[in-house]
Image: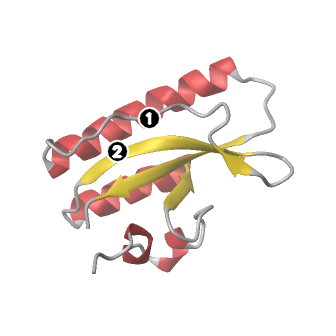
Amino acid sequence: MKKRALSLLPERLSSKSLSAKEVVLPYNEALEVIDFFENEEYLILGWEGWVKTSDGRVGHGSAPQGTVSLENCTVVEAASICRETIRSDKAGWEKDNPESDEELHFCITVRT
């Protein structure tokens, strides 16, 4: 049976996930998780944006779409692509949504 990616993380990171099943973290923690998965040699398959609204609802809403599948990349390539695209998509989202009260998060999927 495959392990859930969330269970691989240190508790201080997994406890911040918006989901009990998936890795869905704020920006800084998402970048930290990318480093963690790269160091542990887990292939990141991609990411997608999630938002949390002021009333606590969670979904895709105005969030960036994320990456296509990175399954043909190396661990290092996939981690680098995720870092770069998360940084640029976060900046674009903030520019496009300056008055938003939503909190941007990133759902990161890995091969376990």
Check the image and report above or below for 110 versus 103.
below
Q: Which residue lies at the image location 42% right of the left edge and 77% below the top edge?
A: 7
Do tag 1 and tag 2 residues touch (Cβ < 8 Å)? yes
Quadrant (top left/top right/bottom left/bottom right) for the C terminus: bottom left
Please tell me the numbered disc located at residue 46.
2
Residue 22, percent from left and from top? 49, 63
Q: Which residue lies at the image location 32% right of the left edge and 34% below the top edge?
A: 68
Q: Residues within 10 Å of mark 1 (few under 14, many from 20)?
A: some
Residue 91, percent from left and from top? 55, 26
Quarter of the view holding residue 92: top right
Q: Residue furthest front?
A: 1
Dot 1 amino acid type: Gly
The answer to whether residue 55 is left or right of residue 4 is right
Secondary element at tag 1 = loop
Q: What's the distance in space between the residues labelled 1 and 2, CA to CA?
A: 7 Å
Secondary element at tag 2 = strand
Residue 1, percent from left and from top? 27, 81
Q: State how many labels appear.
A: 2
Q: Which residue lies at the image location 58% right of the left edge and 64% below the top edge?
A: 17
Dot 2 amino acid type: Gly
Please tell me the numbered disc located at residue 66.
1
